[in-house]
Amino acid sequence: MQAIGLIFICDPVDVDEQSDALQMQISTSVWNWFDVFESKYTSFSHNMKQYAYSRLRTFSRGSVRV
């Protein structure tokens, strides 16, 4: 689990500059979170496929022996 924080700039000299900085901060935080989620999901999915394949292989070997 990763915490995402945003920094708000108060009393900006230039409102457009604040908007750009805030958008950059948001996009950086959000994309980092997606990268973490994607890597965790990919790892989980890979492990589940390996587990399912090993169970299927074990079951197949057991049914052939009978």
Image: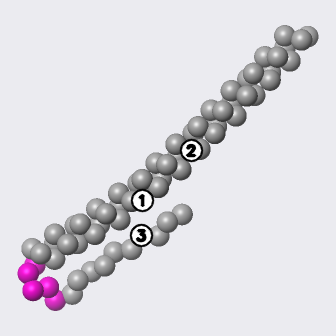
Task: Give residue 29's position: percent from left, percent from top.
Answer: 35, 65
2 vs 3, front mark:
2
**Can you tell which mark lies on residue 4?**
3
Q: Amino acid at mark 1?
A: Trp
**Label 2 or label 3, whichever comes before in sequence order:** 3
Task: Give residue 35's position: percent from left, percent from top.
Answer: 42, 53
Quarter of the rendering occupied by the N terminus? bottom right
- Which residue, given by chain and number where applicable, does mark 2 sit on? 43
Mark-to-mark CA distance, 1 and 3: 8 Å
Mark-to-mark CA distance, 1 and 2: 16 Å
Which element type, helix, strand or loop, lies under badge 3?
loop
Q: Is residue 44 above or below residue 32?
A: above
Q: Amino acid at mark 2?
A: Ser
Question: Quick check: 35 left or right of 51?
Answer: left
Residue at the image position 73 percent from the left and 23 percent from the top: 56
* Quadrant of the rendered image containing residue 10: bottom left
Q: Is residue 6 above or below residue 13?
A: above
- Which residue, given by chain and number where applicable, does mark 1 sit on? 33
Looking at the image, do the residues carrying marks 2 and 3 touch, with CB atoms under 8 Å apart?
A: no
Looking at the image, do the residues carrying marks 1 and 2 touch, with CB atoms under 8 Å apart?
A: no
**Label 1 or label 3, whichever comes before in sequence order:** 3
Which element type, helix, strand or loop, lies under badge 1?
helix
- 11 or 47: nearer the viewer: 47
- The type of colouring in the image is one colour
Residue at the image position 59 percent from the left and 44 percent from the top: 44
